[in-house]
Image: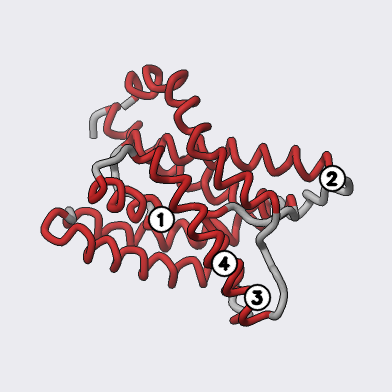
Amino acid sequence: MELKQFNRYLIYFISLFLISLGAAISIKANLGTAPLISIPYVCSLISKLSVGTVTFIFNIILISIQIILLKKDFEKRQLLQIVMGTIFSACIDFSLMLVSFLNPIDYISQILVLLISCVVIALGVLLEVKTEVVYLPADGFIYAISKVLNREFAKVKPYVDTSMVIIAAAASIIFLGYLAGVREGTIISAIIIGPIVNLLKNYLDSSIDKLI
């Protein structure tokens, strides 16, 4: 295996870990989860299953929607999303263990932890997209929509994220009787992760290209 090909796959697996770590940090901020896992998090509260387990089920649904949207344009290699989605789901539960020590005690600390989670997720998304190995199901879903609408990934992402937040909020109210996992932090994440991806892209694009 060539060095650049090895780097590509290494960076891709690092991106999976970073996205799962960022999602776990967002949960610990306790200001609402990142949009990426807002629906799985609420569904885990409803079903009593782990966040990782529900994320796996949610991933299968997103892959199915991609196939429906893209039809013949859906690349067969993207079926590997099932494998990578499984790894990612396990990484979420593992990351939650890693950040179990994070317990911000005041609002400023919560905001700081939330912002850190957004940067970590954005970096992971950038690396994932740049390596072009295979999308995570959530990002593959966004890519499918961006392709159908002929819009840039980063411009579509905030709208998809916001839609997921609304669905998560509605589900929590209907099935739990209260608003769970969705707060101001969720909205902040939905709005700023896409722009942070673009910002990091401007600074890191050339460096990543040299590696892969």
Residue beneath disc 3: 173
Q: Which residue is painted at 41% across and 55% down in the image?
A: 138
Front one among 169 and 50: 169
Residue under numbered circle 4 = 168
Nearer to us of marks 4 and 1 is 4
Q: Which residue is mark 2?
A: 107
Which residue is the site of mark 1? 138
- 148 lies above or below 56: above
Mark 2 Cα-neighbour bin, 10 Å: few <14, some 14–19, many ≥20 = few
Q: Tell me, for residue 103, which label it has, or none.
A: none
Marks 4 and 3, the one that precedes in the sequence: 4
Distance from label 2 to label 1 (Cα)? 29 Å
Determine the CA span between mark 3 and mark 1: 23 Å
Residue 114, horizontal then vertical, whole percent: 69, 43
| Residue type at the position of mark 4 | Ala
> At which x and y percent is residue 105?
88, 48
